[in-house]
Image (tube, grey):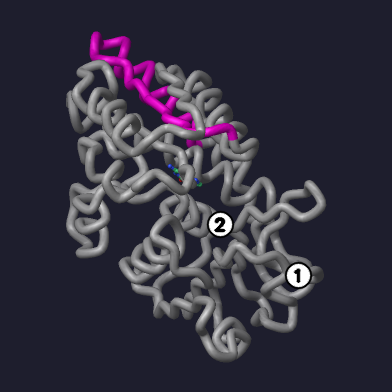
Amino acid sequence: MTARVLDGKAVARQIFDDIRRAVAARVSVGKTRPKLATVLVGDDPASVQYVELKQKNAKQVGIDSEDHRLPALTTTEELLSLVRRLSADETVSAILVQQPAPRQIDMARVVQALDPVKDVDGFHPINAGLVALGLPGGVEPCTPAGIIELLDRAGVQIEGANAVVVGRSNLVGKPTALLLLKRNATVTVCHTRTRDLASHTRDADILVAAAGKANLISKEMIKSGASVVDVSTNWVDGRQVGDLGPGVDEVAGWLTPNPGGVGPMTRAMLIKNTYEAEVRRRP
Ligand code: GUN
């Protein structure tokens, strides 16, 4: 079997087109244009690249943006002061603080200082709580929402499927498990302390690999025909790879490329969440 491609780039392009039309329609009737503020602390090359792509995507769809860069030695108090200012700024619809931040930053405090309506990542406890409870009004985090959208657009059935998520981060693993559960998958969450990882992954109709460890999942650990989503961004010899070993495409039914799978979907959902944040603020 050669897996069919879960083409994040192509699906993201469709979502950008939809949002571009929605923004233009909104502005044409005299309503406000959404504005995204990104905040980057330090100069990690991968994070710089991600923020620049997010800025570029905003521009492409007619969303205004601000690009805040703070030095690597910024304190939590200094970052809090910027986040509070942006939260109070009437012209800003959505705020994204790029993660990971340098070690001295207390991200839990920073996230809680965000106005939940402008929390475009869905990381504020109010948004995370609403999503966890399955209540309306919360913001779904971008990567998990992008994964679900990608599976939906390919016609992969989530309801009733055995879904295995490898990784339990607050950024990806945990919220992805919650969104799959909301869609009535039978969800297993595996992590670094899981015994016999292969016994779980081999049962997965949907496998989400978000462990951040290159070659963690070999083709022998994949169920034939499974839908496999390779989320992680690992750098090996300067090359971006996910968590999958070679040959997974020979066994899987659907597979995300990496790069070009989940990354573009994360940015598409960020742009969608930015638009929706403005609509919620100013209907
Ligand atoms: N770092 C990697 N992915 C993300 C994301 O979706 N949001 C933020 N803020 N940081 C990230």
User: Which residue is rendered at x = 39% and y = 44% of the image?
Assistant: 105
Res. 276 visible in picture: no
Cβ–Cβ below 8 Å for labels 1 and 2?
no
Q: Is residue 90 left or right of residue 59?
A: left
Which of pointers 1 and 2 lies earlier in the amino acid sequence? 2
Q: Nearer the viewer, residue 8 or 56?
A: 56
Point 19% across, 47% down: residue: 137
The residue shown at (30%, 50%) is 108
In terms of depth relative to the viewer, which is nearer, 219 or 43?
43
The picture quadrant where one finds residue 206 is bottom right
In the image, residue 45 lies at what x, y percent? 64, 36
Q: Is mark 1 within 8 Å of ligand 1?
A: no
Label 2: element kind:
helix
Residue 16: x, y in percent?
Answer: 50, 31
Q: Residues within 10 Å of mark 1 (few under 14, many from 20)?
A: some
Residue 141 versus residue 178 in the image, above or below: above
- Quarter of image, res 53: top right
- Label for residue 245? 1
Q: Which residue is mark 2?
A: 154
Q: Secondary structure at mark 1?
A: loop
Q: Quadrant of the C terminus?
A: top left
Q: Is residue 71 left or right of residue 48?
A: left
Q: Give the magenta-colored segment's residue range.
A: 15-43
Q: Is 79 placed above or below 259 here?
A: above
**Residue 39 lies in the magenta-colored region:** yes
Q: Is residue 148 above or below residue 264?
A: below
Camera-nearest residue between 169 and 199: 169
> Mark 1 and mark 2: span between their CA atoms?
23 Å
How far from the left and from the top, in percent, is residue 208? 54, 67
Amino acid type shown at disc 2: Ala
Q: Nearer the viewer, residue 142 or 203?
A: 142
Amino acid type assigned to the residue bearing label 1 in the image: Gly
